[in-house]
Amino acid sequence: MEKTPRILIIGTADTKADELLFMKQCIEADGGAALIMDVGVLGRPVFAPDVPNTEVAAAAGTTIDVIASLGDENKAMTKMADGAVKVALALYAQGRIHGVLALGGTMGTDLALDVTAALPLGMPKFVISTVAFSHLIPPERLAPDLMMILWAGGLYGLNSICRAILSQAAGAILGACRTVMKVQTQAPLVAISSLGKSALSYMVTLKPELEKRGYEVAVFHCTGMGGRAIESLAAQRRFAAVLDLCLQEVGNDAHGSVVTSGSDRLEAAGAQGIPQIVAPGGIDMIDMQTWRPLRADYAGRPYHAHNRLIASVLMSPAERREAARLVARKLAKATGPTAFISPLRGIEAWDRPGEPLHDAAGLAAFCDEIRQRIEAPVRLVEIDAHINDKLFTDTVLEIFDAWVAEGRIVRGAAQAG
C-alpha cells in the first residue's frame, strides 16, 4: 500500500496537454505524485514532459524523426507503444511508479492496452478512453485487472464534463494504489473455469477439497473476460494447475459470438506446460445478448435467457462436432500433462432430460467427435455421469491427486514436507 503513490500518466502531450496537466494537478492535490510520459509523434508539447517522446522512441530502438517519417499513423503509434512498454516496465522495476493512468482516443487506447497488459497483476492500471467497454477492443488485449472509464465529452479540450471524468480517474488510480494488496500467495494457486452454479456446480465441491490439500483456488466466470484472465495469468505462469472445466468461450469464439475470450482461449496453460484437467462444461451453448433480436438462422432452436444481458441457443450436432475438433487441436499443442474428462450424460444444468436445452443426439455427436480426435499424450477419460454429478468431481480429484503423487503438480501447502 502506497501513502504517496507515484502515477505514470501516459498520453500525447502535443494534443492532450491540458488534460494531462489537469490530471497531474488532481493527483498532486490529493497527495500523490505524477510523471507524464509523452507518446505523441508529430507536434511539440507546450510543457516539458517527465518522459519525453524522444526517450520513448529511443527505448523502441529508433528516433522520433524516424517514427514520424514512417508516414503511417498506425505504424508510428505501434512503434511508440513498443517504447512505452519498455519505459513503463523499467520505471516499475526501479520502484519509481506505483500505478499507470493512460488517456486516449482509439490511438492512445491502442498504445495504453499494450502498456497495461505488460505490467504485472496487482499494479493499478486505469485507462480513460473514448472506446471504453467497446467491442472494438479485443478481449486478448485486456489486462486481467484493468480499470476503464469512458472519456465522455472530452475529445478536444477541457470542459465541465471532461473535468468530472478525469478527476474521477485520478482519484480512482490514487485510491487503488493506496489500498491495493500485493499478490502474495502462501500456497500454490489452482484455477477453475466455470459458469454460475445454476449451470455448473462442480466448484462447490472442488474448491474446499483443493483447499484442504493446501492450495489456493481461484474460480473464473467464463462469460468472455473470465477466460481471458485465465489465459493472461497462465501465460505469466501464475498457476500450479488449471482445471479448465468450462469451455463455453471456446465454442462461442468458433461460432462468432461476441461472448469470446479471443481465438487463443485454451492455449496458454498448455504452451507453458502447466498441468491441465479439461472438460466441456457449457460448450453446447452459443451465447448472445438477450437485448438484441435473435439471429434469423437461430430461429426455432432451443433458447435460454439467463438474464436481460446474456442468453444462449443450443448448438447443432454439426456445430458441436466442429467445437470438439477445435478443442482437440488446442489440447494437442499442450506441452504439459493434459487430461480431458468427457461426461456422457450432460455438460450443464439445462441439458438434463426435461430441461430446455436437452439434446441427447447433440451430446452424443460431441462425445463421439472427441473420442475420435483426442490422441495421446492427452488422456481421454469418459464417465457415465453428468458434469454436475459427484462422479465428475471425484474423477477430477483422482487425476489431480495422482499428478501430485507423481510430482507433476507441486504439492500444496498442507502436503509439503
Image (tube, grey):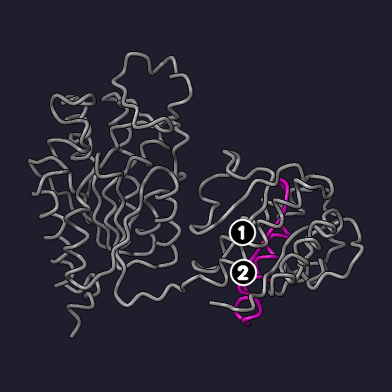
Indicate whether residue 144 is drawn in magenta: no
Q: Amino acid at mark 2?
A: Gly
Q: Secondary structure at mark 1?
A: strand
Residue 193: assigned label: none
Q: Secondary structure at mark 2?
A: strand
Report the residue marked by disc 1. 126
Residue displayed at 62% across by 49% down: 149
Q: Is residue 124 left or right of residue 87?
A: left
Q: Nearer the viewer, residue 183 or 76?
A: 183
* Label 1 CA crowd tier, 10 Å (few <14, some 14–19, many 20+): many
**Can you tell which quarter of the image residue 183 is in?**
bottom left
Under mark 1, the amino acid is: Phe
Residue 61 higher or lower than 102, as above or below = below
Mark 2 Cα-neighbour bin, 10 Å: few <14, some 14–19, many ≥20: many
The residue shown at (18%, 86%) is 417
Q: Residue at x 82, y 47 (%)?
A: 159
| Depth order, front residue of 313/410 | 313
